[in-house]
Image (tube, helix red, strand yellow):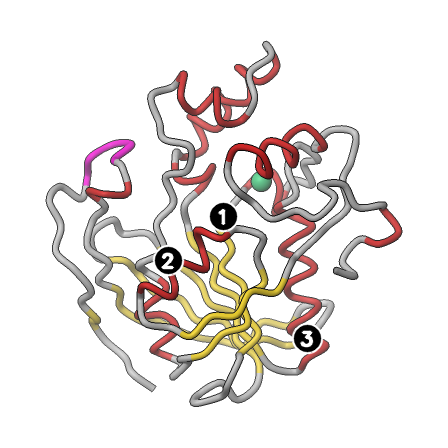
Amino acid sequence: MRAGSIHMSNSSNPSEPGGRAASAPAATLEWQASCTLPTRWASFQAHVFVEQATGKEHLALALGALAGTERVLARVHSECLTGDTLFSQRCDCGAQLETALRRIATAGRGVLLYLRQEGRGIGLVNKMRAYALQEQGADTVEANHALGFADDQRRYDVCGPMLRHFGVESLELMTNNPRKVEALAALGFRVQRAPLTTASTAFNAAYLATKASKLGHLLPGAIVEPDEAGSG
Ligand SMILES: [Zn+2]
């Protein structure tokens, strides 16, 4: 296991607010601590890494032997406070998080990276502003644009040192987002995509449709019946 500082790239201004992905700060991460994290699906080993440039604390939940394993079942999940912890039905984040952890537990092996980039990278304040604009008729992409942000401000370069910490080189990545697959492949990982469909609700159907039509997410049929939740 590799520990300590792992430098990935150079950066201009790490504190630039709302900075575009192109000027993203350097992904230098330090592994800090780990512990057992029992959940309702499995007892994961939780690891926390600190990104030097931003001070952000990123997490990994690991299960089973990962080093050198082919097609490690993996999820790269970006923080969504409202969806992951407050049961919001405006998005599908909480359902995706739960499905991914359950699938890793069933497989007995895998890793979930929990990245601290709230609101597709614009932060909680701006996500709330975007929600307010959506209440006036904007979709999720239009709201981001109205606030001066790109469609999706997330960056995935922090995944490189985290996955390499566990000796992972080959992934079966649970995602509907082709950008995520491309980003990890560009970091040198062998990536196979596994769809991650969840139930559509009355509140998030329009959001899911926008993710499919404007953000290129691969959502076959776009809407999945509730009794199929998590089975895709
Ligand atoms: Zn969400």
Residue depicted at x 70% and y 48%: 220
Q: Is residue 112 left or right of residue 165?
A: right
Q: CA distance from mark 2 to mark 1?
A: 18 Å
From the image, state whether disc 2 or disc 1 is nearer to you: 2
- Magenta highlight: main SS: loop
The reply to whether discs 2 and 1 touch (Cβ–Cβ < 8 Å) is no
Position of the N terminus by quadrant:
bottom left
For the residue labelled by badge 2, is the local secondary structure a helix, a strand or a loop?
helix
- Percent position (x, y) of residue 142? 48, 20
Q: Quadrant of ligand 1?
A: top right
Which type of secondary structure does the marked residue at label 1 adopt? loop
- Residue 116 vertical position relative to residue 18 in the rendered view, above or below: below
Tell me the distance, in whole angstroms, between the alpha carbons under discs 3 and 2. Answer: 25 Å
What label does residue 79 carry, if any? 1
Residue at (60, 39) in percent of width and height: 212
Q: Nearer the viewer, mark 3 or mark 2?
A: 2
Query: What residue sits 55% from the left and 72% below the top?
Result: 172
Q: Is 78 part of what is drawn in magenta?
A: no
- Name the spot of residue 116 as percent of width and height, x first: 41, 50
In terms of depth relative to the viewer, which is nearer, 15 or 164? Answer: 164
What residue is disc 2 on? 183
Q: Amino acid at mark 3?
A: Ala
Q: Residue furthest top?
A: 136
Q: Which residues are magenta?
A: 15-19
Residue at the image position 68 percent from the left and 58 percent from the top: 98
Give the residue number, with chain letter if any, for mark 3.
105
Q: Amino acid at mark 1?
A: Glu
Q: Is residue 83 left or right of residue 79?
A: right
Find the distance from the CA under tag 1 to the CA under tag 3: 20 Å
Q: Is residue 145 left or right of residue 216?
A: left
